[in-house]
Amino acid sequence: MQHVWIVLGVLFVLLNVAAGLIWVERRMLAMWQDRLGPNRAGPLGLLIVLADTLKLFFKEDWIPSFADKKIFVIAPAIVVASVLMSFVVIPFAPGIVVADLNIGVLFFLAMSSLGVYSIVLGGWASNNKYSLLGAMRGASQMIAYEVFMGLSLMGVVMMTGSFRLTDIVEAQRSVWFCFTQPLGLILFFIAGIAETHRLPFDIPESESELIAGFHSEYSGMKFGMFFIGEYLGVTLISAMTVTMFFGGWMGPEFLPGWAWFFIKTFAFILFFILLRASLPRPRYDQLMESGWKVLLPLVLVNILVTGAVLLYLKG
Amino acid sequence: MQLLNILLDIAKTDSAEGYFPIGLQLLFAAGFVATMMVATHLLGPKRKTADKLENFASGIPTHGDARTPMAIKYFLVAILFVLFDVEVIFFYPYAVNFRELGWTGFWEVLLFVGFFLVGFIYIIKKGALKWED
Amino acid sequence: MSLLFYISSVVAIVATLLVITCHRPIHALLYLVVSFLAVSMIFLSLGAPFVAVLEVILYAGAIIVLLIFVVMMLNLGQEAALQEKQWLQPKVWVGPSILVAVLLLEMSILLLRGESAAIQPAVDMKRISLVLFKEYVIAVELVGFLLMAGIVGAAHIGKHKKKHPHRFLQNGKENGHADNNENNKEVKPGELLKEEMIHN
């Protein structure tokens, strides 16, 4: 029964965080862009979350007559399900982890590799030229950056000698991996932004040229699913960054482990939002070429240098 | 609850006991997604009119089928992705165990990366990774 | 063996049958994803989590994406769907399926006669890596070599050569027969690929 409570607790917290991010993102963007943001509904505009959710539920759930109905329905389900599954391996605090697999990192990579289907199928099923373009761009972007997402974590795995995420957190007791693996951290974070297709890498849905790209035909909570999936993805990448590079639940004693984990994760979520507020979108060919030609060689160099240094230190 | 008990029994009889919570998470995640989908389907209004397929305001009429053949560049990216992914797979077992493999393992992997880089440099020189040509 | 194994086996077989009988390529590919996920569950139930995860990363996550891209790129449309339907007529599949049934019978007799294999203990990742990079290191290097050849080959298949200059440029050279030329010789990317595939 203990498993059930952990699973339910994790899902409850995650979904609330994802919903809360609607408000956080809009308020933060407003703050950094010198605007007010949502401030009418409830204290500090907090009830905007509730209003938005209710609105999405009561919108017409329209499936275009020219769309492929089955796949049109499945696509938004895949994005949320695959991201929620990735959270299985993340240790939130000592003992609070859904399943502490010895292949944790690989499980995360496997689940995030399934996320590409939501975009490609959603865009294809919509049967709309903009959506299809967005889907093709999004899929190529995600698969190109997925290649070195796995490799960028290998430096950390080499230092720990384990794929288990609790082992990786424990190994950071003396020094966090963000100091010993700075290149790995930067590369992983870039890959993470591309995987969640957030700004500045939101090319599949760039609203000014593709009118929301792969999800322009979606309405109601089906659109909401893509939305939740995006926020869950942001949370996932932040949580993974914290676990792999910033010592997970580690921190001074005066706060419990889970509090440190949430504070650190929240800091990275804010960083995601800051990126959105401040960076322009690169051109598509620039994105692809920099991925293949710059980041992939860099990640290989990172692995080889890490290996050589560690073996040299071992003697 | 009964379903849960059956699942628990399955988990106990299995060699893969540690994976039971994953199944549970999948069950709840799928349940959440399904609930949302059904709820939005039931709650939203349904107005089936032909007007929805009309162009809005001064929109341009659509031409032909949306599913036109795509550029071959995307296919190239996908096939390179599969090849690189297979390469990457070999790094996973190496990374987790490279201390035991020592310097010999390191030279082996260096050779492996060398092969990879030769092919990689070749296609860069050939301009296969250039998006615009 | 465990219940999990049998459930996932049944799912894998049913999904694979649906892949064959579905005549819409994208739906078939979705069933193929399900089939691969089920196979990965089989590996998991047999105590090989590493292979299970690789199955998802490589097959479900990479190869199917490639196939979806091919389907999107070719976009064969209605004619191809009709052709697919014709392939599902009994006269096409009865012969092969009888042959396969004979093989299946043979295999099941062998399985029933032989002593049931004991369930292997879970495969440790460290052991895989030691075996892979010590005993079978030649195989690893050969795979590296093969992949290099694959990358070079892919770059050549996917190379999009502009064989014909733009029609405005053509105009200058060939005294205004641009329109005819364009209609006769223009090669769409999709067709180029089909040709390549036939040659291979």
Image: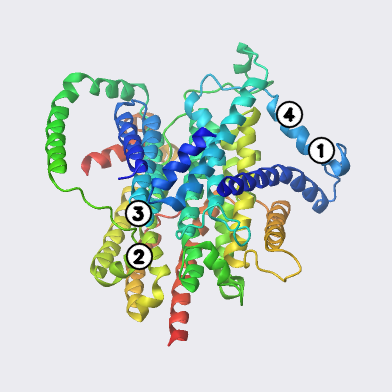
Disc nearer the start of the sequence (4/1):
1
Give the chain letter at badge 1: A
Q: In front of the other: label 4 or label 2?
A: 4
Whether pointer 2 and pointer 1 mark residues with C-beta atoms closer than 8 Å, the reply is: no
Q: How is the image coloured?
A: rainbow
Q: In front of the other: label 1 or label 3?
A: 3
Q: In front of the other: label 2 or label 3?
A: 3
Q: In front of the other: label 3 or label 4?
A: 3
Q: Amino acid at mark 2?
A: Phe
Query: Closest to the observer: A125 or B99?
Result: B99
The 10 Å Cα crowd at callout 3, few under 14, some 14 to 19, many 20 or more, is: some
In this figure, which residue is indicated by the disc labeled 1?
A47
In this figure, which residue is indicated by the disc labeled 3?
C47
Q: CA distance from mark 4 to mark 2?
A: 52 Å
Q: CA distance from mark 2 to mark 3?
A: 32 Å
Is residue A122 in view from this perspective?
A: no
Disc 3 and disc 4 on one polypeptide chain: no
Q: CA distance from mark 4 to mark 1?
A: 12 Å
